[in-house]
Structures are given as structure tokens and as C-alpha cells.
Amino acid sequence: MREIFVLTEHRQGQIRDVTFEMLTKGRELAGKTNTELTAVLFGKEVKNHAKILSDYAKNVLLVEDAKLENFNSEAYQKVLSNLIRERKPLLTLIGHTSFGVDLAPSLAVSLGTPLATDCVDLEFEDEKFTVTRQMYGGKVNVNAVLRKAESYIATVRQATFPVEKGAPMNGEIIEVPSPLSEEITKKRFVEYVLPPPGGVDITAAEVLVGIGRGIKDESNIPPVEELAKVLGGALACSRPIVDKGWLPNDRQVGSSGRTVKPKLYIALGISGAFQHVLGMKNSDLIIAVNKDPKAPIFGVADYGVVEDLFKIVPPLKSKIQELKG
Amino acid sequence: MDIIVCVKHVPETAEAEIKIDGTGKAIEKNGLVFDINEWDDYALEEAVLLKEKFGGTVTAITVGSEDADSVLRKCLARGADKATRLTDPKFEGSDGYAIARILAKVIKDLPFNMILTGTQAGDDGYAVVGVILAELLGIPHATMVKKIELNDEVAKLNRELEGGLEEIVEVKLPAVLTIQTGINEPRYVSIMGTRKAMKKEIKVLGLAEVGLGENEVGEAGSWIKMEKMYVPPVEKQAEFLKGSPEEIAVKIAEILKAKGLV
Amino acid sequence: MNFELTEEQKYIKSAAKEFAEGEFKPEIAREFDQKHEFPSAIYKKAAKLGFIGCYFDEKYGGQGLGLLENVLMEEEFCRVDSTLGSALFAGLFGSDMILEYGTEEQKMEYLPKSAQGEWLSAGAFTEPAHGSDVTVMDTVAVRDGDEYVINGAKTMITNAPIAEYAVVLCQTDPEARHKGQSLFIVKKGTPGFDCNELTGKMGIRASLLGEYSFSDVHVPKEALLGEENRGFYHFLQFIDVGRINVAAQSVGMAQGAFERALKYAKQREQFGRRLADFQVIQHKLADMALDIESARLLTYKAAWHVDQGQIIPKWACMAKTLATTNAMRVVSEAMQIFGGYGYLADYDIERYYRDIRISAIYEGTTEIQKNVVARILLRE
């Protein structure tokens, strides 16, 4: 029986959420295509991970090698391409993460297998493999068809598919000997680094005021920070603000920043690219202010205001101050 | 240190309203402002900074129509030495794979120590071109690069991971590095640079000069083909608060009060 | 005949646009406006990138470009922000006369530092007793051996409080009126040369204004700029170029106000419709566009003639008259479209409205421009 592969992503002893999201989606696809769901796991002494995965997949292909201890696209590509050549899965799912982005495209080229990246949905219908992707920062969706092939590879956007455990599958753990006979020479993992923490832990704040591109200039930040203070909260931001050096890296909310879950998140001038939304969508109450009525942020907010943030901040601050006496 | 930078001419859509055009497969481009892809902008700056530090040359390459000359001129004005535009009607409809294949075919005959490009493009967001290019050229790569340190034949890099974490990796040169935003601060175009750029020739190559067949580019040479473009369905929509800014402020304050947040 | 800008001119315009949009934030502009402060840091940045004094030769720190390129940059800067744009483009005021009439030594001493943004300059012509009438000066320079001794006063001098040097128009032959005037370069710190800042300006407040007093100011004879007793004629040529610059500034400010009004008209709803859906607003917008485009054409034409080697006073005066008159109308209409909000400082139109007003006054009032144009027409 043919398989659907899900490449396990793990880091510092933890299987990352995207793996379970892919396994959930993979289970659905395997059911529809009459294939078996197989989790693929590479690492050094990761049998405990294999055990967890066996609840989610029919097979767990385990390759253990000291050279696979940390993610390294060169090593991963060699091992994974071997497995794909050997077992010819219908589809290989990889997270559209820092790891997946570093691995999937070159893997696809080396195998001559069509690849679709950053998919938010996938569907097999009448021998046709269709994916849904987003373009222009999430402002439009696209349905795209992959060139017909024996086998496909897709990278999947994080936090898109909900995780459902379902009945344990008691998958068989199949140990595959590592094909890595030689050293990995072109690329070497050195270490993980966490940028030094700043003064504020946004993950602990009950109220966050998030700012994005709409803030326009660094000099506009202080009045917004005052609003955050009046609300008893802290200032957070989307990626462009950190890129410009206006706020330190630990204020960034989103996939490459922190994930937050405050009681109140006020998004000011944030368009709502999925990377940011990923980091704040589970906040209890979300209020968004943006000039563009079609900004994706209004799809996650409870309340929306289509207006220039600079016109809302001053009266809002004084109203809150009034309420507080 | 000879560096090739691959750049793309894209519409700025972060703050623009987007409409889908009559074909149902593309957006209405009229009225949109085009510029260098944001990620490529940082890649270009990084290349010029490296050149200023280590000497050598920077060559900018794009696959695009004549309009993309404005991006190449910008690269030249900001410090690139040479520019090449790969243009052919047959290139239309190319996905990231076909684009990388076109680039690889041209780049393989050029001298270089490093190829830089943006991690992704703001329009299609494939995030594949740099890595595919590396594989086609048979050289290593690293994506989402936030810092570059060069020692002899090895580049020591910080790669951005999730949750604020980074990893340090070493990659042997020559290599393709895809650059993440925020790695540097892109400079303005100067008048001196602009004048210098105007005196330079932009080399233009078509399908035949590139040396690929028709079925290796465009939709025929792509892995994925666009079927339909549409505005994402609204799963949940915020309740919109209307009125003057003062009225809206009162409404928000009331909501916060009702939820016990003030 | 060709109305297209060259490729290079288009890129120059886009470089100016990118810089101005990156640097001129409304909040920053408001601050300089409120504090009556010159934006020195931005000025230096702009100069390093070649936006200041682009028409100076490269050996004098410029880019060897023409007046039209300067006009394009100035227009773009003033479009993005009226206060900062106008202040930046006034930084070199007066130094153009050194470029035109200076000796090699004078050029090398003053121009590179000016074009690189290190020195600001001033042009001191107007006197308390004679505003628009420059045919006679109360400020007198008397030859004394190898020196000249200057006595008198000048007022309404842009950059005076911060300029490193001033080009001063003096009477050297009091009997000969305008045929007895000469120009001198006077450095800041010369004994007897003092400045007093004039405050309370209505607009263009990021550009500082002052008055100079001269009491027995000794300058070496090498400070004489151009020919002795030809100062008035040198000044006339200079002011024609200045007039074209004011026209460019006005076109830019008008364009900036227009774009803001257009955007607002498309967003703002009244009586259940967008402002832009009312015919009365549509007509306003069409009239504004007409005012701007006609002024722009005449301004470019005047600048183009200068670049062809002919400073034609008629075109300079016509361009300034049309551009400033039209721009005042455009900015006023923009405020009308914004309604009450336009009157508030938060909506930059208020600043544009104050900043544009001076354009019909300085570098010769509109009335003076018309005098010149009429005189030429009657003579032709």
C-alpha cells in the first residue's frame, strides 16, 4: 500500500506542533486516497518521540544517527530522499517552517518531484493534486494544481490544521539504518542562540497593544506605549517594527516571535499577515484598528475599527483614563 | 568576493487594496506601486556591505519584463556593478522552480563566491527560488539568514527559527544564502549612485540566449499551475465599530469596561 | 518637442521621492514647525546623498546636473512635506551667486562645504527701509586700502541665524544707485557683523529668519563677489533662478495638498456618499489638477531655458506668478475638502496652508513679478 509521509520536526527535545497538525491532515488525506500514514523521524536517541508518533500514524520510520541530532538540511535531504526513492510515497508533508523552507525545495529538485510550498489546504481528486496557497500577504487565495507525478512534496503552513488525536493508531516503529556513511561536509550546525531578553515579557502581560507598519515612524510609538500603560499592559509589535529596529526582538508577536494569549490584544495598524496572527489569535479579546477594511486582521478580531490609528489612540486613552478616574 | 543578487520586481501590497482581474488568475496591477521585493532589498544591501568590506563585485539579476529595469537600476545605484535582466514572453507563468532554472542556467557560467536573494517574495511567497537554485548549481545553501560572518571559505550564519530563536550554522562557499528582513538597514539611493547607474548597461537575455527550451520555462516548465485566484472566504468577521473617533473611543471603552478590563 | 523627462530625470525624481518619504514624517515636520528649528540632521543626510546643490559642478561638491533636476527634487521634497522640503532647499540660498560670479578661490572655499551640507548660507539683499525696491541700498561698503568697510542693516534674511556666511548686496557708489552696487561675502563671526533672529513667522518655520546689522565690518578686498558696481545685475540673474525654485516648491506643495485631499475625498463619507461622489468636489479636484499641471509646465519650461544657457526673466517671473497663485488656490481648496479637520494641525493641510503663503511674497512679490513681465511685454 502506498503511503503519505509526514516529516517529524523536533527541536531541543520537543516534537513541534506542526508535526501533529500535518499528521491530522495526513490522516484525513490517507483515508481519502487509500494510503497509509507514515511518520518519518530522524534524530539521535529519539525513540521516545517515535513512541508518541505511533499513536498518530500507521508507521513510524525511524532513522537514528548522531549526524541527525540537530536539523541539517544536507543530512536530512540525503536520508529523506533515500526513503522517498525506496518507498515512493504518494505525498510527503513537511512543515513550512525554518527547517522545511531549508529542506523541501532542494529535496524536490534532487528527486525530480513537484513541490508546492506554504499550503493552507491540500486535496486529491481524480488523480489531480490541488493545493490552496495564499499570495500577497494573505490578501488573496489561490488554487493551484501540481504537475502530474508519481510522488509529490508539499510544505504546510503552521497552525493551519487543528490537531485531532483520534483513536490511537498503534503504529509500527520501523527502524531504518542510517544511510549516512560519510561526514556531512558542506553544512554544520553550531548552536542555538536566543537573543538577550529585554525588559518586558510580553507573554506574561494581560493586556497587549500591538503595533504594525501603520505606526509609520518610530516617533509615533511613545503615545501608543502610553495607551498600553493606561490599560495596564505592555507594547508588542509585528515583524516590520523589529526589522526597522524600533522595538527589540522580544516584543515581536508571531511565528518568528512570541506567541501570546493576553486577556486583551489591541492591534493598531497591523494588517494581519498569518505569521503575526499565529502569535496572537488565541487572545481572549481582540480589537483591531486598521485603515484598510479588507485587512486580514479583521478576520481574527472580535471588534474592528476602520480608521487611522492616530485618530483613535488619543481619544481612547482619555476615555480609559476617565473610566479609571 | 563576487556576489550575485537575485531580485524581483513586485507590487507593494501591504497597505494597498487588492482586486482580482478579469482572468481570475491574477490581481489588478493598475494603480499599484512596484518596487524591489522587500526581502531582496535586504539581500542587495547585504551584498553591497560585503563588497564594501571585502572588495569584489555585485551583479544583480532578475527574471522579469522591461518594467523590472527600475529595480535593476536601483541595484546599480545602490552599489551593484552589473545588472542582467532575463526576459522572454515564454517566461510568463513560471513558478519558483522554473524561475530558479532560468537563473541557474545563466549563473552557472558566471564567476561568483556567493549568491544572495530574499527568503521569499512578497507576491507569490513560494520561498523556494534560492534553495532550488543552489541545488541546480550543486552548491550548499542556507535560508532565513539574519547575520553573515565570513572566514575564508566558510560563512558562519545566524538563521532565524521560530519563537525568537536563532541557530548558528556554517556553510561552505560558494553557497546560496536567502536573506531575512531586518538583517541590515537598506540605504537610500543617492544622486551620485543614480547617475552612475544610468551610465551602465543592463544586459538583456531571452530564452534562446539563456539556452533553455520552451518546455523548460513558463507553465510548461513549472511544478505548479495556478487555477483560480479568489478573495479568502470570511470565516469570522469582526464586529465593526462606527462613528467619529471620539464615538468609537467611547464604544471601545464601554466594551473594555463590560469585560472587566478597565 | 518633447514633454517627457529623460530616464535619468525619472530616476532622480524617484530617488528624491524615496528619500523624502523615508525621512519626512509628518510628526517630525510638526515638531520642527512648532519649535522653529532647522532640520540639520536631515539636511546633512540629504546633502550626503547628493540632493543639495546638485547643479554645482562635481569639483565644487555638486553633481553637475541642471536646474531642472533641482526643480524635480525640490518639487518632490515639498510634495512629501511642505515645511521640511522648503527648509532643505533653502539651505544653499545665496551660494548660487558664488557659483555664478565667484573666483576659483571663492568657489573652492565656500561651495564644497555648502553642497556637502556642512555650511548653510544666506543671501542678504532686503533692507528695512526698502523691501521690494532694491535699486537703492542703505548698506554701504567703502574701500579702505586692501579692505572694504561695511555699515548698514539687512532684514528678512533666510538662514541668517545659522548661516556660515552671507552674500551681501551693498552700495559701493552711493550716487550711482543700482549701477553702484556690489556683492560681498561676509563670514559669520566677523567683528561688527551681528544677527538677530526674527520669530513669529506664519509658515515655513523650519527655515530660520533673521536680520543682520553691520557696524564697521572690515572684509578683505577678496570678499568682493563678481564685478564691482555690477552687483545689482548679478543679483537680478540670481533672483530669476530663485524664482524658478520658488515655483518648483509651490508646485510640489500644491501636489502634496492635492494628493491628500484626493485620498480624503475617496474615504470620507457624508450624507451616505463619498465626498468624491459629489460633483462639486469632483470639479474642485479637476480645477486643482489643472492649476498644478499648468504651473508645472511653465516651471519646467523656465528651468529648461536656464539649462540651455538662457536665464529669461519673463519665464521665471511668469512661472513664479502662476505657480504660487495656483498653489495658494489648490492648498486652500484642499483645506475646504478636508473641512473642519483640515484646520487642525494633525491633518497637515493646515501646515501646507501656512507654508505656501510666503511663496507669493518672497523672491519678489507677485505684484513685482507682474511689473517685470509687463515691462518686458511692453518693450518687446
Image (cartoon, coloured by chain):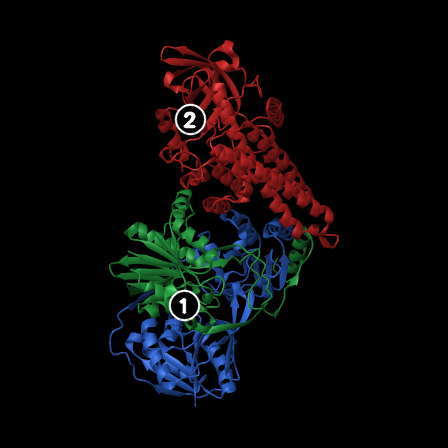
Chain colours: A blue, B green, C red
Would you say residue C73 is visible in this rendering? Answer: yes
Up the image or down, C301 lies above or below A179; here it is above
Where in the figure is residue A292, as x and y percent of width and height?
A: 60, 58
Question: Within 10 angstroms of label 2, few (less than 14), some, or many (20 or more) residues?
Answer: many
Question: Mark 2, mark 1: which one is toward the viewer?
Answer: 2
What residue lies at 52% left-to-right and 45% top-to-bottom?
C4
Question: Within 10 angstroms of label 1, few (less than 14), some, or many (20 or more) residues?
Answer: some
C116 lies left or right of C123: left
Residue A63, picture quadrant: bottom left
Residue B166 image label = none
Residue C98 image label = 2
> Regarding mark 1 in the picture, which secondary structure is present there?
helix
Give the letter of the chain under mark 2.
Answer: C
Cα–Cα gap, marks 2 and 1: 59 Å
Q: Which of C346/C85 is in front?
A: C85
Looking at the rendered structure, the kind of residue marked 1 is: Ser
- Dot 1 corresponds to which residue? A98
Where in the figure is residue C109, as x and y percent of width and height?
A: 36, 27
